[in-house]
Amino acid sequence: MEHILEINNLNKKFREFELKDLNIKMDKGYIMGFIGPNGAGKSTTIKLIMNLLKKDSGEIKVFGMDNIIHEKEIKNRIGFVMDESHFYEELTVTETKRIISPFYKDWDDKTFNKYLKGFGISPAKRIKELSKGMKMKLSLAIALSHNAQLLIMDEPTSGLDPIVRSELLEILADLIQDENKGVFFSTHITSDLDKIADYITFINEGRIIFSASKDDILEKYGLVKGAKEILDNETKQLFVGIKENKYGFEGLAKDKHEVKKILGEKAVVEKPSLDDIMLYFTRRTLNV
């Protein structure tokens, strides 16, 4: 089965930052969360997928096709939602639609109007009169009105209030009921992905730390708490990172089953959140 998105050994070097040997594979019917701290390389990766930046080496395939050779066909089948609105502020929603719709061969006015109504967006409103949340919903309405099979979202929930964020997540959960579609969702707000993501790809400092099923990730890692006395040079190797305080320590275990086997009753092992995992991987200086 062809992957809806496939990245092989992707490299891009800037003066002070480098994407190094990125490998990501995503199948239809799933939501993949793309996480990492600000500056980790998420937006750069998305720009390379969209051919808005020129790669140095590697391969990017969307729907099994090379993203440069078949760029026009691919973009007809992609919905792209960015963290900021890039619409002309003086135009109305209807005028904006008239400019954008001719670019897509499968544009559907009925679908667009259905989303506008559902989102409570007046076609007569100027873009500058819309709130940040409404602009995001307009971006989503446009992305979903030409039968897009892959939705690529770059930090879409950043700066939105919890109600709008929750509405957005519900829309994505509904969209993915069509098993021919997929969502690639970049964010540093990992609590959003706790709710809806099937797979997680974690990037830090331009390198992929892991790309796997969310359930497998949460099953593998463990948040461990215990007394400092149980830590020695050997047990420290079991952790991604450790935080010590006067009462004891907390650490992220690389394999919680291994830690349970070695430390037994001496430590408490809890299920981590994606936030916990990201924190420990990005602050390795906490290692002792």
Image (tube, helix red, strand yellow):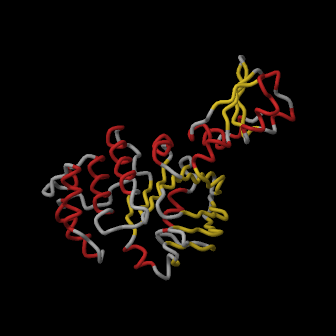
Instruction: Indicate left or right for 84 with 69 as reference.
Output: left
Q: Residue 219 placed where, x, y %?
A: 64, 42
Q: Is residue 234 left or right of residue 46?
A: right
Residue in view at x 40 percent, y 73 percent:
75
Name the residue rendered at 40%, 79% in the picture.
Answer: 72
Q: Quadrant of the C terminus?
A: top right
Residue toward you, 255 or 160: 255
Residue at far top of view: 247
Residue at the (20%, 70%) spot, across then down: 98
Q: Is residue 18 above or below residue 169?
A: below
Residue at position x 76%, y 20% from top?
Answer: 227
Q: In this view of the protein, which residue sits in the foreground, 52 or 106?
A: 106
Query: What x and y, as percent, mark residue 269?
Result: 68, 29
Location of residue 123 in the rendering, given as x and y in whole percent from the top left corner: 15, 57
In the rendered image, the residue lying farthest to the bottom is: 69
| Position above or below: 33 against 191 | below
Residue 282 quadrant: top right
Count all numbered tags in the image, as a single digit.
0
